[in-house]
Image: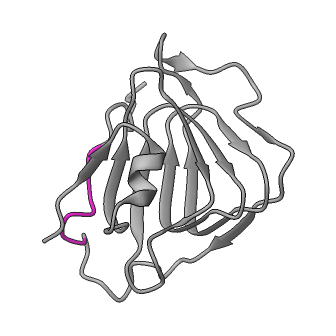
């Protein structure tokens, strides 16, 4: 069973040997950047949760689900194979961030892969988590 992996920066997350499972990135200022590297694979996808603003740059590749709690910036030519979710929350005030919540000068390849978890048991061990604030009853 994979345990959640909590990091204080994306740099730490992409330099570790294990880049699959639940990868939770949390830092005091909430701003993260991934500039190159790969997280997950076709056979071992990841759930990447960024608690803050996130810049996906260079030739980065993420296989699995990328969830960005804050604003999302695209630079370079990154690829996300699976699903990409942007909440667009201002974490300091816990209110919707001012628009636009997705910006950038790069070209992202978003490959929606409906069956990314279909050959696995649901939910996958160690790859599920309750995301604070992901359910709002209003």
Above or below, 13 against 53 in this view is below
Residue that protrudes farthest toward the left in the picture: 1
Could you say which quadrant of the image residue 73 lies in?
top right
Q: Quadrant of the C terminus?
A: top left
Q: Quadrant of the N terminus?
A: bottom left
Question: In the rendered structure, which segment of residues is drawn in magenta?
Answer: 124-130
Q: Main secondary structure of the magenta part?
A: loop
Residue that protrudes farthest toward the top in the picture: 93
Above or below, 5 against 87 in this view is below
* Rendering coords of residue 81 (x, y %): 59, 72
**Residue shown at 37%/34% (left/top)?**
26
Count of numbered circles on the image: 0
* Rendering coords of residue 92 (x, y %): 47, 12
On screen, residue 22 versus residue 85, left or right, reads: left
**Residue shown at 40%/86% (left/top)?**
43
Above or below, 125 against 23 in this view is below
Above or below, 36 against 112 in this view is above
Residue that protrudes farthest toward the right in the picture: 105
83 drawn magenta:
no
């Amino acid at each position: 069973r994979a345990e959640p992996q909590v990091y204080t920066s994306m740099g730490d997350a992409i330099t570790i040997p294990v880049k699959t499972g639940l990868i939770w990135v949390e830092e005091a200022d909430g701003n993260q950047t991934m500039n190159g590297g790969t997280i997950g694979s076709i056979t071992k996808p990841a759930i990447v949760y960024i608690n803050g603003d996130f810049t996906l740059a260079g030739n980065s590749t993420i296989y699995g689900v990328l969830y960005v709690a804050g604003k999302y910036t695209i630079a370079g030519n990154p690829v996300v194979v699976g699903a990409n979710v942007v909440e667009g929350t201002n974490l300091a005030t816990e209110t919707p961030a001012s628009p636009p919540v997705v910006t950038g000068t790069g070209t992202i390849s978003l490959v929606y892969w409906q069956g990314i978890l279909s050959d696995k048991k649901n939910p996958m061990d160690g790859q599920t988590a309750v995301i604070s604030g992901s359910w709002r009853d209003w």
